[in-house]
Amino acid sequence: MTAGVNLKNIYNLTNNNFKRSSMKKNFLSIISMFVLIFICSASGFAQVKNSIHQYLRDDQTGEWLIGLFENYAVYDCKKWEYTDVKGNSCKLRCSNDLLEVKRKKGTVTINGKKHACSEVTSQFMPDYPLKDETLFEERLNEKEDTATLIVQNRSGKAGSKCNAYIDGILHGKMSYDMVSDSTGSFQLRVPLVCIQDMRFILDDAKGIKKGWIGVFLQPGDTTFLYIDDIENRIYAMGANARLTNETFAYAPDRLDFKKKNRDDYSVKALKEEGESLMARYQQQMDSILAGHPYLSARWKAYHHEFAFLDFVFNLMQKEYRAPETDMIKYAVPFIEASGALNPMVPAGIYESRQSDIFCDYTTFLNKISPKMKNKTMYDTMVMAVNEGLINLTDNEMKDLLTIREISHQALNAKSDKEEEALVVGHEKELERVLAIYNRYLPTMQQRFQQVGVDVMFDIYDSIKVTPLLRELLKTRWTYDELQKSGKALYPYAMQRLRKEVKSLYLRNMIERENQKYIDYANRKDELKKVTLDETPLKNLTDGKDIFEKIISPYRGKFIYVDVWGTWCSPCREQMEYVPALKEMLKDKDVVYLYLCNKSSDEAWKNLIVKYHLNTENSIHYNLPFEQEAAVERYLEVNGFPTYRLVNKQGNLVPSKMPQPSAAAEIKLQIEKNE
């Protein structure tokens, strides 16, 4: 029988009281009884419990059908509470839904539907009994739909932490931090347009798939993951549960290029090493499949691509160090012939790895294309002069042609040192040419964007990929261009995208992102207090003099200096951490000084708005090129971003500072200098 209070007995008791007592006493008795029921329920004594702990799977489909546990059951990716338990039968409720479950040896009947089933006692779900040759489908929904992930720990520990991430279709990882509720459950809802793999890690999962756990999420579906952290088991329920369960149980060892540094290989040797590793990896897969022949086609595709895309990524990374001729001879033909450009998994699976490969591959094709081979930004400047977009004096044109020739020689330099040596003796010409570029920055940026769209879209049209993947590549490039430029796209880029990308979802993503930058530009009046007047600096040329003039009003405060550029991806990534940094240092009397490098005023102001850098303790300068270069020399800037600290006495602390993502380290450095 149930462990709760029996309502029938309460009724009989109150009925007898009516016969023996006055109406007043009976009324008080009834009130007392219902108070007792309420107290018992609130204390947990009215909860119906089960005495078993059982995982049952459907013998016909192989899926985890139902879990019957002490305090709740799991069915249809939901947790159900018991309303009644009698022997091998129980009644369940989830919101307004009701279930009746009857168990017999070898069967379970749920709301009248009988299933042949068996109890699962292994660490992972047993092999599925039927073959599944269904391949991944390459498609993007026109609208986002929510995928729900529910993770339940058997121990029911509240306050456990979970970190999960999933790759964005157009941009980097989306990270989620979760804390378990009072029942030990995590729940996450993620908007998706295609199947994607999510990885997460639990702080307190003892012995269960140590490290990152991978699950497959589908838009509109729910995945329920049960982690038995007492008996060391893990099972998935839901639309893509088969692939998730199979991947838990069987996974070949990944490729290992660690025995030698990737840079120690030639392109030819790395290709041969990768092919050898892939052959051994395939042997592992064949061995697993020999013992488990019903593993699904999607399991085969997923694990093959897991290794193969890792190999191709390592090979394409050689483009930054290896001779161009070696890449053309060994890497490009291999990639074109091997299927790397048309993976067996859709864009949402290994999205970041696929994106990196296509970026490296098309960047290399861009570099060797007839339109761009041996071309630098200075060639585009010459083109702009010839088209009448910018006007230069004879001396300015002479400087530009000199620097263009040096830039062509630098393309063939064998080392950074050799490249730097080419500029020696021409530093002044280079500064003057960069000043010209800065003077005509909006015009040059528009011309660069048009050239970029034409060249990259033509490359995407030339490679043998599916139509949807081609659209995705063009959309990714356009999205990245938006982020790098820091402002709304010029009309030409939007026109080509609208013409050549048919996916409504992809087009709408770019339209929305583009509108954000238009909105940022319309909020420039908010920045008057933080973008300071540069007139007092006008006649200064020495970097130290300029910097000390900037910081002089803030003597007695710490100054955290951020040297950045709107074009700099790592700079922008670190801006995401600034609000948390400011919160941690709110009691330290810190001023935040941002010095922007080679960026248009529009992009500069847009990103100040975007990253919420317009707080009262923020100061922003976008100095003219010569002044910014002088300040950067004084601050010993040799890369972007660079961070420095000025103490309360107005002195520059000798060592460089950690980046905003390391807020605790910054706080420690400030405390050392107090």
Image (tube, grey):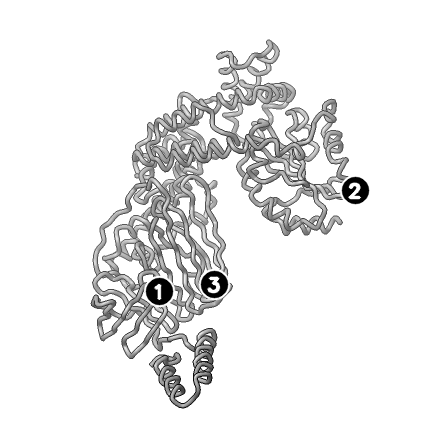
C-alpha gap between disc 3 and disc 2: 49 Å
C-alpha gap between disc 3 and disc 1: 18 Å
Q: Nearer the viewer, residue 370 or 538?
A: 538
Comparing labels 3 and 1, the label whose residue is closer to the camera: 1
Q: Is residue 76 left or right of residue 182?
A: left
Residue 283 percent location from the top left of the image: 30, 52
Count of numbered circles in the view: 3
Q: Nearer the viewer, residue 114 or 558?
A: 114
Q: Earlier in the sequence, mark 3 or mark 1?
A: 1
Q: Residue at x 67, y 36 (%)?
A: 619
Q: Badge 2 is on which residue?
A: 649
Q: Residues within 10 Å of mark 3 (few under 14, many from 20)?
A: some
The type of residue carrying mark 3 is Asp
Return the mark for residue 120: none
Residue 536 percent location from the top left of the image: 74, 26
- Figure check: 197 above or below 37: above
Is any part of residue 270 visible from this angle?
no
The quadrant holding residue 73 is: bottom left
Q: Badge 3 is on which residue?
A: 181
Residue 297 percent location from the top left of the image: 26, 51
Q: Earlier in the sequence, mark 1 or mark 2?
A: 1
Is any part of residue 125 visible from this angle?
yes
Q: Badge 1 is on which residue?
A: 94
Q: Residue at x 59, y 40 (%)?
A: 612
Residue 345 percent location from the top left of the image: 32, 45
The type of residue carrying mark 2 is Gln
| SS type, badge 3 | loop
